[in-house]
Image: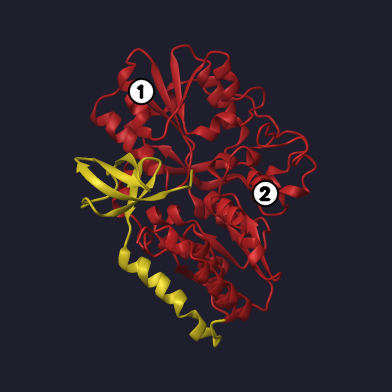
Amino acid sequence: MRYLDEYRDKQLVDKLVRAIKHASAQKIRIMEVCGGHTLAIRKFGIHRLLPSNIELLSGPGCPVCVTDRISIDRAVKLARIQGTIITTYGDLIRIPGSASSLNQERAQGADIRIVYSTLDALAIARDNPGKKVIFLGIGFEATTPSSAVALWEASRQKIRNFYLLSMHKVMPPAMAALIDQGVDIDGYIGPGHVTTVAGADMYRDLVDKYRISVVVSGFEPVDLLQSIYMLVEMKNNGRYGTEIQYKRVVTAEGNVKAKEIVAGIFEPATDSWRGLGPIQASGLKIRSAYRSFDANLNFDLRVDPVPEPGGCICGEVLRGLKRPDQCDLFARVCTPANPVGACMVSGEGACQAFFNYQ
Amino acid sequence: MCLSIPAKVLSVDGNMAKASVGGAIVNTSLHLVDDVKPGDYILIHTGFALQKISEEEALETIRLIEELDKASGETDI
């Protein structure tokens, strides 16, 4: 096994497509809430293999995309402080804030560095004791543990010039908020790596309250088609619940060690999502024991709120209410090279996935 | 960001490992997983191993799909 090629096998794909066509008669609406799934569905053309009664919607699964504008303005403000080094994952620097982006700040001399891992950011702090090194922490349950480990290591190694700006979010409250806001779906393709860490049991309340299904899926064509088949079968049988397709890494309880590390560093807080607004307990703030590493408490981050750019429907795209190509700006004004909205910035954003693989 | 990749562990040194991703060697943190040995497959996300990959479950997934035709009453073309 190499855990990739086996799940791109044409015969297995054909078999699944036949099984889906055979089983599926009713209309079914399925939403994916992971940027990796959005990208894979478009890249492999999964949507084109399905009968027309199966509708796939993209939800708020791209961490860069759901980071709201005010968070970008705060990051820009941090970058302008003398003696700071901003460290972050790549895509974030391209999101336009209200007046600037991290990319523009970098062009004007701010020290902004893209890192692959939080431990690289920590090494930058260790190597630059005279600077304040701030890591911009975005991402969901799969990514949060790496920020937690960095803080834990910073504390253990007494690296006093390292700070985290936590913009980390958790998925289930947003999945519930979408339904509360009127998004009409039969089930979710559950985010595979989020659930690898957090465990499939985390959907129990969501499934019980809204009587919908969650099938936690892998990211290869065979994985996604099998997950869609499972959702179709559940609907056919009048069942709802949580099932795991991606069993090679996902369990009911998840990665207990990673969850404990995260719980030791972070606590739930209300957070604001682009397109969805503030959602209770959907964010993670740093516990007071680690306050000396919290960028929120150690820098002045006050900025004025600003509206989203005119004409951009990123918020509606993130809720699955509109397709990217229903936006007047799509592919004309807004392109991956010159994105207006966050959904076009990231390769996992619905707009860029549409643009690249339409 | 959500993109993670399966990799084969080549060597382990404390909290860090070297792993092969399709031949490319990457450094990865083992802070989040226990009992990782050379030869194991792990899922790497932003430089951290998130989980060991279960070969047994991986094979079972494929076996279930191979049996689908029987379940849906279809025959192979």
Where does the image place residue A277, in percent across and percent down from the top left?
Answer: 62, 43
Tags 1 and 2 on a common chain: yes
Q: Residue at x 43, y 25 (%)?
A: A134
Chain letter of the residue beneath label 1 in the structure image: A
Q: Position of residue A161 (x, y in %)?
A: 34, 20
Tell me the quarter of the picture where residue A46 sits.
bottom right
Looking at the rendering, in which quadrant would you find the N terminus of chain A? bottom left
Label 1 Cα crowd, 10 Å radius (few <14 / some 14-19 / many 20+): many
Q: Residue at x 56, y 72 (%)?
A: A14
Q: Nearer the viewer, residue A24 or A100?
A: A24
Estimate the x, y position of residue A78 in percent, counting from the top left: 51, 21
The answer to whether residue A263 is seen in the rendering is: no
| Residue A222 versus residue B50 in the image, above or below | below
Residue carrying label 2:
A354
Q: Label 1 sits on what residue type?
A: Ile
Q: Locate residue A99 relative to residue B49 in the image: left or right.
A: right
Q: Where is residue A213, by image quadrant?
A: bottom right
Q: Which chain is red?
A: A
Which numbered marker is on residue A124?
Answer: 1
Q: Residue at image x 35%, y 39%?
A: A148
Q: Nearer the viewer, residue A42 or A279?
A: A42
Cα–Cα span, label 1 and label 2: 36 Å
Q: Report the disc number at residue A207.
A: none
Extreme right residue here? A328
Label 2 SS: helix
Chain B shade in the render: yellow
Q: Mark 2: give few (<14), some (14-19) or many (20+) Cα within 10 Å.
A: many
Pick whichever of labels 1 and 2 is earlier in the sequence.
1
